[in-house]
Image (tube, helix red, strand yellow):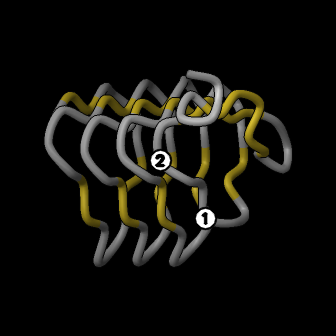
C-alpha cells in the first residue's frame, strides 16, 4: 500500500493490499478499502463505507455510499461512471 502525505485516516479503517491513497485524502471511521483501491487526491470517504477491489475513485470525490468492485467512480457525491465488469 502507498499512503501519500497529509492524509487523515481515523479509527477502525481497513486498507487492503496494493491500495494507493493520494495526497490529502480523508478516511472516516470504519472505512474498508478492498485490494487494489486507488483514491485520487483529496478524496473523502464517509464513515462505514466499503470500496470494492480494484476500484478507482477520482480526485476530490466524496464517497457517501458503498462503491462496487472493478469500477471507476467520481464526483460529489461519488457515483459509478464506468463499470469494468459489465463493459467486457
Question: Extreme right residue here?
Answer: 76
Mark 1: give few (<14), some (14-19) or many (20+) Cα within 10 Å: some
Q: In this figure, which residue is indicated by the disc labeled 1?
A: 66
Which residue shows up at 25% across the image and 45% down it? 35
- Identify the secondary structure beneath mark 1: loop
Specify whether 29 is left or right of 18.
right
Residue 83 at x, y percent in the picture: 64, 34
Is the Cβ of the residue at disc 2 closer than 8 Å to that at disc 1? no
Which residue shows up at 31% across the image and 53% down it? 34
Specify whether 47 is left or right of 11.
right
In the depicted view, which residue is nearer to us: 55 or 8? 55
- Identify the secondary structure beneath mark 2: loop
- Toward which corner of the image does residue 86 lie, by quadrant? top right
Mark 2: give few (<14), some (14-19) or many (20+) Cα within 10 Å: many
Which residue shows up at 20% across the image and 28% down it? 2
Quadrant placement of the N terminus: top left
Quadrant placement of the C terminus: top right
Q: Foreground mark, 2 or 1?
A: 2
Query: Does residue 15 sit above or below 61 in this rendering?
Result: below
Residue 48 at x, y percent in the picture: 51, 78
- Toward which corner of the image does residue 7 lie, by quadrant? top left
- Toward which corner of the image does residue 80 lie, by quadrant? top right
Q: In this figure, which residue is indicated by the disc labeled 2?
A: 69
In the depicted view, which residue is nearer to us: 15 or 3? 15
Which residue shows up at 51% across the image and 30% down it? 56
Give the spatial CA distance, label 2 vs label 1. 10 Å
Amino acid at each position: 500500500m502507498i499512503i501519500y502525505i497529509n492524509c487523515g485516516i481515523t479509527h477502525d479503517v481497513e486498507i487492503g493490499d496494493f491500495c494507493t491513497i493520494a495526497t490529502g485524502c480523508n478516511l472516516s471511521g470504519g472505512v474498508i478499502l478492498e485490494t487494489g483501491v486507488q483514491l485520487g487526491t483529496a478524496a473523502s470517504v464517509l464513515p462505514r463505507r466499503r470500496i470494492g477491489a480494484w476500484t478507482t475513485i477520482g480526485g476530490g470525490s466524496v464517497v457517501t455510499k458503498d462503491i462496487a468492485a472493478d469500477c471507476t467512480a467520481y464526483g460529489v457525491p461519488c457515483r459509478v461512471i464506468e463499470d469494468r465488469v459489465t463493459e467486457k
